Amino acid sequence: MKVPSMQSRAVLYVAYPLLPVTEASCGGAEQVLLTLERALSRRGWATTTAACSGSQTAGAVYTTGPAGNGSLAAADWHEARHTQKIIELVSVRETIGRGFELLHDHSCSFFNQAAHVDVSVLATLHLPRSFYPESFFVRRPKNLYFNCVSKSQAKHFADVPQMVGAVPNGIQLDRFSLETRKQDYLLWLGRICHEKGAHLALDAAEEAGTPIIMAGQIYPFSYHQQYFEREIVPRLQRMGSKARFIESPNLADKIALLRGARAVVIPSLAEETSSLVAMEAAACGTPVIAFKRGALPEVVDDGETGVLVNNQEEMARAVACVHRINPRTCHAHAQKNFPAARMADGYEALYQRVSRKKHQQQSERIAA
């Protein structure tokens, strides 16, 4: 059978409805979407991103509403509006003869509405299996396909129908240059919430007697803000000058922090499906000390680009030996394993696979 080409090369990316997609995005799904969208835009794809106001991409942005403000009721309203406007956009584009070849969902939820759009939907599962309602994977429409972002994550979704593969995340390597001269501080970087273990990072640094910089974003959700006030503020106060908090660093500041750190610590309490922070650290020549959970062993080469540990106490002890990790080894590992171009290649292959399945289904309907 001849493989059909993706003639329109028009793809609609669907972002998380509450937060803008920009270079300053803290969420991994937003960062992956932006990196992929830019790579495929450069390759000639006509990209449109459905996202809240304030989003900035290489291609077109279809604004679905304002960013979220934190209340659960408002979040439900935002998501409903986001969904409605995407369904309308797909319908209008099809009506005027400018339909999308594919809808690529990075929102972690829109794919549950796939039956309401007349286009193939590829949903990238950025989260651990336990974060999704099981109803999301029951009786799925034929136009819906899934992919994972790591081998370890894929094992947990092996029973899900219409799974088309795993594409490891990648980063824009040219932004993260090698720095061999490290300063005496640990770095925790990310989204400030309980499952990311920021409080454990502070505890490990205090136990190791090493200064720590905590840099990240507090999302405008009450449970994130409560976690910060309950678990982070008292630790920062107790540690005094040994701990510094930088809220929502811009890209330049983030890169400078990554390049200068003695090590990046990742004490995640969730089964991480990937780790962009660990990839970025390696690209800067900075070792990672991480809990041995989820896909982190796929990203961190234990003993070569970092140290994998089981708990906070082991993390504190690892600080004393992390100087043995060669920054050049970290950088070379990142250059080989985390290029955005390889991620783009993987998704183009999945788009082709989904297109092939779509044409097969159309042929079967005509034959019937």
Image (spheres, rainbow, N blue to C red):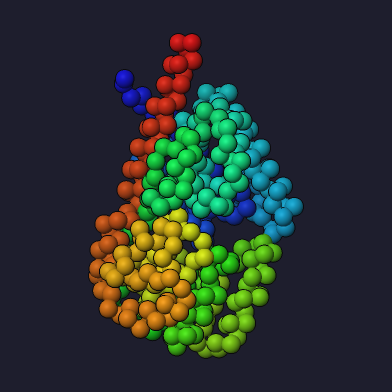
Residue at 42% of width from left, 22% of height from top?
359
- 174 vs 22, left or right, is left
Query: Which sits in the foreground, 12 or 109?
Result: 109
| Tally of numbered tags | 0
In x, y percent, where is residue 61? 54, 44
- Name of the residue lying farthest toward the right: 73
- Compared with residue 2, is residue 62 higher up or lower down, i.e. above or below? below
> Is residue 280 visible in this depiction of the protein?
no
Instruction: Name the one closer to the observer, 75 or 223.
Output: 223
Residue 281 position within the rendered picture, expressed as x and y whole percent measured from the top left: 37, 67
Query: Vertical placement of 248 versus 143: above or below?
Result: below
Residue 14 location in percent, x, y? 54, 43
**Residue appearing at x 41%, y 37% in the figure:** 164
Tell me residue 17's x, y (percent).
61, 49
> Horizontal placement of 330 versus 56: left or right?
left
- Kindly identify the residue that appears in the image at 68 percent across and 70 percent down: 226
The image shows residue 207, relative to residue 162, as above or below, that is: below
Q: In this view of the protein, can residue 292 be seen by the observer?
A: yes
State the quadrant of the N terminus.
Answer: top left
Look at 66% across and 75% down and name the residue there.
229
